[in-house]
Amino acid sequence: MVTLTIGCYHYRSESVVRDGQTSNGKQRTKCKSCRRSFRESPQVNGYSQGEKELILRAYNERPSMRGLQRVFGVSRPTLISWLKKRS
């Protein structure tokens, strides 16, 4: 039998308790020492550099921002911030 010990990423403590679920159904854990909550295996937020370049190249072909939003699933404020950083 394998036992997995989960520790706090912030305080490095092993005194943690389960604290419900996130909006997408993942287990949330709370540290008793620092009272922060976290997930066991957090996902990377955002888009990879390759996806970002692909979306910006598609924008150069002059489609509408709403079109890019529908096709790639990226929000318009995110696309606008990428374009401002690029210029």
Image (cartoon, rainbow, N blue to C red):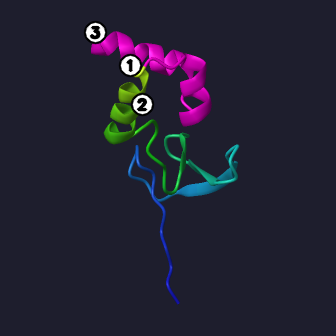
x%, y% of residue 34? Answer: 49, 40
Instruction: Give the overall secondary structure of the magenta segment.
Output: helix
Left or right: 76 with respect to 57?
right
44 in magenta: no
Q: Which three-letter amino acid code belongs to the residue tagged 2?
A: Ile
Residue 62, placed above or below residue 1: above
Q: Which residue is mark 1?
A: 82
**Dot placed on the residue nearer the N-terminal end, 2 or 3:** 2
Three-letter code for the amino acid on which mark 1 is drawn: Trp
Dot 1 falls on a residue whose secondary structure is helix
**Distance between mark 2 and mark 3 Cα atoms:** 15 Å
From the viewer's perspective, tell me whether residue 86 is left or right of residue 56.
left
Query: Quick check: marks 3 and 1 in contact, CB under 8 Å?
Result: no
Q: Is residue 14 above or below residue 35?
A: below
Question: Whole-Å distance between the Cαs marked 3 and 1?
Answer: 9 Å
Residue 65 higher or lower than 32, as above or below: above
The residue located at (35%, 28%) in the rendering is 57
Bounds of the magenta segment: 62-87
Give 73 or 33, whichever is nearer the viewer.
73
Secondary structure under the numbered disc 2 in the rendered image: helix
User: In the rendering, at what x and y percent does residue 3 appear?
Assistant: 50, 79
User: In this figure, which residue is indicated by the disc labeled 2?
Assistant: 55
The one of 8 and 67 positioned closer to us in this rendering: 67
